[in-house]
């Protein structure tokens, strides 16, 4: 047992009668006389939820209560928060020594406390009392809470160093005095790092967390042990003894941000980028010796660019920490000052400090805000010039400089050209949207941090279907899955509202396959959120006939995803685009809706006229932005409805060359479809009922490869359309689909649906409460609804089909 500390005040003598304890041989516990009757109905007592106080093997099972009066039995009032108060009789039965440390296990909160034992004589002599301030700080309920008081069996390890951080930062003028007080206050005391710690100083409560502890024993740096510490119901936490030689290390906010980083090993989907970045930084930070006979300046500038949420900032911070470099972060929007020259001065100060504390990495987050491509103000021009000078100073003259610069942006085209030249930001590394393998790697590393029962098949399915999702999107998906798991357990187990305050009640919760699939269904890629498209609930089975068209679309969209090796084996590339043309109402747009729903790809729908703008250049920019988004969230499908509004035949009039907005938009569209920049994993789907108006350059192979005629439905297709439509309607038994199909020669699919709709309306005209549609209603509907496709238009389609 620990040595008894000498106290200036000794506890007062107690003249109250002592409790009579009964030893129950059946269950080997000690109980008081008044609890014999209760105990007889609960023998042996439940060690998780007991009905009365008892002593078992020197451990006291009781309930917590607040110490109400100010009589501390000779104890100084400034130390009362460090003590637990027990009756003298209980201390004798359990063998607790006055002033020695004991362990308190609060069952309802799954919380452990280390307190000194002290006798008192108030309330029930079997209660365990704590000061009211301790109750408030630990957020304990005022109702009785089960607690186990026991001796400290295993001697605590002696602390060599404590690393801590204040949660409410003290003022600079009292910080030194607070440190002296804190170190004296905890001298010779026992600590557990998982506690919430409070200290009263000059009338104010300061809170702090213990981040890491180090002991004197060999190889006992406990940083990893603390990270893996999982306190179960009956597992005693690690305890440590503070001694006068213990070193106190105070962590500030900048160092804290470094500690909280993801380890580089837990960043998924970026292995190639990490390797390239590490190779550059090894030379820049002097961690690897350059070739001695090569007298060239070391490259120290790196530009990380890519979409938002792909991990540029996280990667820069983590790799700097992994290489042991000190990180200096400069956030673009935050550095600007309203005072003349203050922004440039701050910038130079950061670079100067970084050069003095080598090896170091300077992170320029959102560098395009600091140095835009077209500076609009004098201040922006001065900042661009100052940053250029700072970057030059890193490589000029000082051969032993061990400082590197990592800049991040999601808009590299908006960064000033002078910053991107060689000698400044020499290396430009793209941090792309993860592919299938990258998404699987990210999901695995995210879910390994939380309890889950997700199968590898479901993980692979989610990774393959989460097209265009960034690392941040996948992190949000896992958070949503965790929330869904909590909701599921709350509903299934009927947990009362408010119980979520007790984290222990949710230890058994794990993310299931269903939770992850739910989250995947409700997670949309960040790049798609600005494109408000509601995916229609249309399936292939809702479309009668059109088997040839369905096959062509599957070849262009589904085959490249499901069978990519087949295309590689034959040395060909998948079709880039499909043009559907035919009479109005023949399901061209409906098939595009079914494709959006069935394929699971990111679907971008564009109506031709909506790209046009009254401002010069805006229409072309809209086309560029459309394909930029499509590339970002690839694999994706871009659907142009009424493409004849965009791709009309160009004029032969040389005088109007370049002035027609339609021609400029068409030129931009042609460039995007098959220009210098490749269009990878993006399929273009277009529909029109006037193919003769389309420019021939748009229809050549490599752009809209597949041209499919969608004719008026034949007999079999009409039969299927009637069958699909009537299956949702209450019709009489005398209606024959074959007969209706024969009567609708020359009708389009939309006109057939109109016949069914008109028949239903006629039934309602006869009687508003009609429950069935009869044959006479269809016969009358056929009289009202006539085919509306002119023969000259059909001849135009036939001729066009023969020509192409």
Image: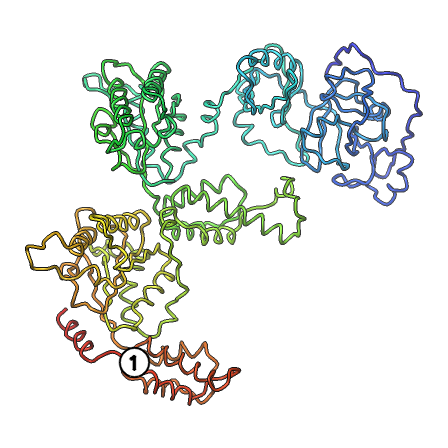
Q: Is residue 471 above or below residue 464?
A: above
In this rendering, the answer to whether 473 lies above or below 12 is: below
Q: Which residue position holds label 1? A: 747
Q: Position of residue 736 (x, y in %)?
A: 40, 87
Circle 1 crowding by C-alpha within 10 Å: few under 14, some 14–19, many from 20: many
Which residue is rendered at x = 38% and y = 25% of the image?
329
Q: Is residue 159 left or right of residue 95?
A: left
Q: Residue 485: x, y in percent?
A: 56, 49
Q: Position of residue 260 (x, y in %)?
A: 48, 29
Residue 673, percent from left and from top: 20, 53
| Residue in front for this viewpoint, 638 or 13 | 638
Write the residue at 44% across / 31% down.
263
Q: Quadrant of the N terminus?
A: top right
Q: Secondary structure at mark 1?
A: loop
- Describe residue 641's horizontal placement relative to residue 205 as left or right: left
Q: Nearer the viewer, residue 658 or 778?
A: 658
Q: Find residue 60 and report its image quarter.
A: top right
- Residue 615 sits above or below residue 257 on the image: below
């Amino acid at each position: 047992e620990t040595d008894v500390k000498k106290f200036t005040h000794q506890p007062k003598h107690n003249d109250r009668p002592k409790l009579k304890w009964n030893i129950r041989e059946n269950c080997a516990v000690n109980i008081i006389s008044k609890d014999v009757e209760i105990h007889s109905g609960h023998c042996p007592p439940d060690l998780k939820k007991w009905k009365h106080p008892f002593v078992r093997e020197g451990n006291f099972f009781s309930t917590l209560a607040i110490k109400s009066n100010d009589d501390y039995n000779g104890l100084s009032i400034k130390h009362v928060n460090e003590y637990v108060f027990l009756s003298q009789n209980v201390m004798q039965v359990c063998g607790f020594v006055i002033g020695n440390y004991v362990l308190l296990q609060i069952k309802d909160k799954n919380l452990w406390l280390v307190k000194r034992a002290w006798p008192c004589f108030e309330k029930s002599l079997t209660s365990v009392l704590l000061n009211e301030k301790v109750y408030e700080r630990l957020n304990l309920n005022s109702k009785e809470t089960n607690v186990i008081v026991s001796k400290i069996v295993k001697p605590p390890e002696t602390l060599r160093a404590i690393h801590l951080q204040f949660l409410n930062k003290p003022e600079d003028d009292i910080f030194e005095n607070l440190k002296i007080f804190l170190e004296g206050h905890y001298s010779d005391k026992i600590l557990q790092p998982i506690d919430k710690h409070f200290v009263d100083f000059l009338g104010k409560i300061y809170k702090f967390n213990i981040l890491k502890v180090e002991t004197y024993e060999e190889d006992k740096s406990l940083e990893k042990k603390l990270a893996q510490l999982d306190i179960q119901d009956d597992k005693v936490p690690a305890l440590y003894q503070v001694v006068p030689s213990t070193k106190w290390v105070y962590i500030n906010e900048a160092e804290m941000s470094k500690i909280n980083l993801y380890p580089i090993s837990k960043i998924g989907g970026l292995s190639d980028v990490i390797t390239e970045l590490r190779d550059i930084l090894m030379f820049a930070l002097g961690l690897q010796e350059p070739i001695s006979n090569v007298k060239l300046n070391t490259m120290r500038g790196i530009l990380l660019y890519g979409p938002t949420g792909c991990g540029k900032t996280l990667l820069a911070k983590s790799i700097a920490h992994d290489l042991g470099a000190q990180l200096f972060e400069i956030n673009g929007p935050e550095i600007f000052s309203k005072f003349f020259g203050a922004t440039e001065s701050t910038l130079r100060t950061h670079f100067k400090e970084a050069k003095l504390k080598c090896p170091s990495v300077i992170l320029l987050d959102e560098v395009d805000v600091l140095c835009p491509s077209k500076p609009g103000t004098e201040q922006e021009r001065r900042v661009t010039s100052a940053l250029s000078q700072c970057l030059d100073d890193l490589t000029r003259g000082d051969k032993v400089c061990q400082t590197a610069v990592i800049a991040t942006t999601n808009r590299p085209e908006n960064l000033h050209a002078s910053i991107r030249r060689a000698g400044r930001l020499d290396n430009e590394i793209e941090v792309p949207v993860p592919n299938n393998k990258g998404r699987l790697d990210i999901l695995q590393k995210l879910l390994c941090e939380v309890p889950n029962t997700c199968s590898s098949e479901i993980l692979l399915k989610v990774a393959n279907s989460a097209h265009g999702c960034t690392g941040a999107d996948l992190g949000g998906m896992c958070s949503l899955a965790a929330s869904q798991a909590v909701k599921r357990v709350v509903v299934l187990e009927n947990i009362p509202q408010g119980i979520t305050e007790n984290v222990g009640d949710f230890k058994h919760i794990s993310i299931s396959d269903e939770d992850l699939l739910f989250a995947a269904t409700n997670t949309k890629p960040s790049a798609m959120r600005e494109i408000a498209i509601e995916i229609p609930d249309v399936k292939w089975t809702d479309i009668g006939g059109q088997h040839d068209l369905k096959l062509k679309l599957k070849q262009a969209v589904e085959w490249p995803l499901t069978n990519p090796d087949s295309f590689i084996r034959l040395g060909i590339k998948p079709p880039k685009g499909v043009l559907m043309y035919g009479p109005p109402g023949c399901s061209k747009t409906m098939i595009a809706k079914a494709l959006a729903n069935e394929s699971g790809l990111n679907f971008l729908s564009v109506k031709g006229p909506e790209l046009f703008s009254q401002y010069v250049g805006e229409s072309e920019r809209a086309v560029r932005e459309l394909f930029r988004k499509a590339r970002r969230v690839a694999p994706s499908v871009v659907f142009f409805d009424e493409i004849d509004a965009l791709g009309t035949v160009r004029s032969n009039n040389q005088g109007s060359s370049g002035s027609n907005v339609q021609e400029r938009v068409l030129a931009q569209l042609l460039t995007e479809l098959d220009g210098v920049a490749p269009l990878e994993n993006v399929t273009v789907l277009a529909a029109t009922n006037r193919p003769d108006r389309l420019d021939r350059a748009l229809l050549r192979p490599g752009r809209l490869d597949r041209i499919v005629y969608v004719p008026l439905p034949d007999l079999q297709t009409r039969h299927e359309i009637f069958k699909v439509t009537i299956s949702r309607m209450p019709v009489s038994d005398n209606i024959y689909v074959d007969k209706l199909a024969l009567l609708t020669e020359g009708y389009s699919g939309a006109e057939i649906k109109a016949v069914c709709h008109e028949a239903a309306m006629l039934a309602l005209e006869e009687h508003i409460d009609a429950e069935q549609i009869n044959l006479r209603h269809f016969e009358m509907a056929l009289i009202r609804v006539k085919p509306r496709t002119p023969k000259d238009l059909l001849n135009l389609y036939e001729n066009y089909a023969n020509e192409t």
